[in-house]
Amino acid sequence: MIEYERPVSLNEGIKFILATMAIERNSPTFDDDFELV
């Protein structure tokens, strides 16, 4: 788990996770370990 210095709401956390997943999905190196079928 990532520890935050300030409280983060659940909605902000979900948006952060979705944004991170989108970046990883669009990353050229991400396809080396995982492919979307």
Image: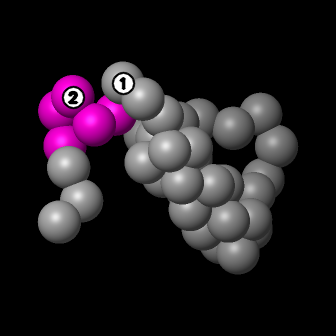
Up-down relation of residue 9 to residue 31 (above or below): below
Colour scheme used in the picture? one colour
Residue at mark 2 to residue at mark 1: CA–CA distance: 6 Å
Going 82% across and 43% down the picture, which residue do you hit? 6
Q: Residue 8: percent from the left, percent from the top?
A: 75, 57
State the SS at label 2.
helix
**Is 32 inside the magenta-drawn segment?**
yes
Q: Are marks 2 and 1 in contact (CB under 8 Å)?
A: yes
**Quarter occupied by residue 37:** bottom left
Up-down relation of residue 8 to residue 23 (above or below): below
Query: Which residue position is annotated with label 2?
Result: 32
Q: Residue 31: percent from the left, percent from the top?
A: 28, 37
- Residue closest to the eye, 10 or 19: 19
**Is 1 inside the magenta-drawn segment?**
no
Left or right of residue 26: residue 5: right
Query: Which residue position is annotated with label 1?
Result: 29
Question: Magenta segment, which residues?
Answer: 30-34
